[in-house]
Amino acid sequence: MSKDQKAPEEKQPDLISEAKEVLAKNNRDDKYTVPADGLYPHQWLWDSAFISIGMSHYDTYRAQKEILSILRGQWANGMIPNNVLSAGIAYRQDREIWRSYVSPYAPDNVATSGITQPPMLAEAVVRIGKKLSKTERRTWYGRVYQALVNYHQWLYNERDPHHEGLTLQIHPWETGMDNTPSWMYEMHQHLLPFWVRIAKATKLDKLFTYIRRDVRYSAPEHRMTNVDVMALYSVQRRLRRKQYDIQRLLNHSLFAIEDLAFNSIFIRANHHLRQIAKTIGEDLPEDLIANMRLTEKALEQLWDAYSGQYYCRNFATHKLIKVPTIATLLPLYAGCISKERAGQLVSLLKTSRQFNPKYPVPSTPIHSEFFDEFRYWQGPTWVNMNWLIIDGLRQYKEDELADKLTDKTLELVKNHGFYEYFSPLSGEPAGVNDFSWTAALTIDLLNNQKSAK
Ligand code: 9WN
């Protein structure tokens, strides 16, 4: 090793302080953290959960504030929106896109989106709780308990209308993986609005580039295609027209998928919510407990024996959408699958043509026809996905593999910075730099690495 090169352990304090700087830079009003300056100027639900997990290592008070800030946006029916939109004239257009005020359930004093995102909150609450004293932890849990119960109840009441145990999602944004192939496949097969089809056929979709915010901050080849973005906005408009009312949406043709990643995360969140209730001596509603059990069982319905993978399911037709994505690995994080199934997923994770290129884990398997090295959720490696998989591997005592994946993930950040995502083939960074959850989860991964040593 040359003189200038530092041993990894010497480098770590630097990396941690650099990560903290990113979070400080993206801090707004000492209340919440934007995912990235410029490109993402609002508060996002699952981003804030990941962010607070990182913050809990050095500022539990600020981490709690992050969660309380997103809860300002909770609707009266229990829904927690994926966005609490920033105030100020500069963001008027974003607030107009959503118009949360069209729903009677939306809060009066804060503008939000009208959809949710993967329920990572209970995980964040527990991770923060672990850093507190017993008394502080009980106070903290007591503060957020009812909000979490209302949210989980809402997910069952509104998003599992047939009591199947699996919740449905109504927009790809709800999965947090906007252009993930399973959803894009369904959309292109059945749901592309006619005006988007015309734009696609006439190549007029190119014009859309001029009004997109994201391509001002990142290369167009690293983002969604214009056609996909137009289609997603059209779905969003339909939700708004129906005032985000699930009954009205269910009565009409509905783009609804029982998303594998969302439901896997929900199962883990249910587990955490049970722990939170136990710690503060609360009894969860019995119907909620019954629903939680049902979800764990129902996950197995998403397993396809032929290909040996889990998939998303179309809500209306009940057909599995057999388009493989990284979501197939998330039942590891759910923690409720058998050892046998976990073993099958671990083998998948070790297969180079699928999920084990030089810089794993690709958001879409390498051999997939959808694979595109840099295109958002259709190929790149994301730190939050790796974090979820690492956690899942540890739950199944696959520590060696978890350590390896941790090292690989940190290598990407050490070599390139806190980017939004990376090429799984070369490690080349993509998207925007100084991305909050990359920074926050780096802090968490480094701390776990240290405590394991
Ligand atoms: C739409 C903020 C969010 C993440 C999502 C990611 C992306 C938004 C967008 O950015 O989604 O919600 O503008 O494309 O896909 O996971 O939460 O970082």
Image (cartoon, rainbow, N blue to C red):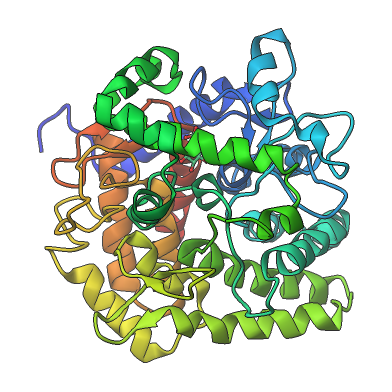
Q: Residue at the location (69% across, 59% down)?
A: 251
Q: Is residue 24 above or below residue 383?
A: above
Vertically, is 341 above or below 319? Answer: below
Q: Nearer the viewer, residue 55 or 210?
A: 210
Relative to 423, 87 lies left or right: right
**Residue 438: percent from left, percent from top:** 43, 39
Q: Residue at x 10, y 38 (%)?
A: 1
Which residue is more in the foreground, 2 or 266? 266
| Left or right for 18, reference 364 | right
- The residue at 78%/44% (across/down) is 71
x and y percentages locating residue 427 in the rendered image? 19, 40
Q: Name the residue furthest top.
A: 89
Instruction: Please identify the quarter of the rendering in which residue 215 is found.
Output: top left
Q: How many marks?
A: 0
Q: Is residue 400 visible?
A: yes
Quadrant of the image occupied by residue 34: top right
The residue under the point 69% across, 22% down is 96
Residue 362: x, y in percent?
26, 53
Classify the position of the C terminus by image quarter. Answer: bottom left
Q: Is residue 453 visible?
A: no
Residue 275 screen position, x and y as percent? 73, 74
For the residue pair 72 and 260, the one nearer the viewer reads as 260
In the rendered image of this protein, does residue 192 appear above or below residue 35? below
**154 or 17, nearer to the observer:** 154
Q: Is residue 146 above or below residue 67?
A: below
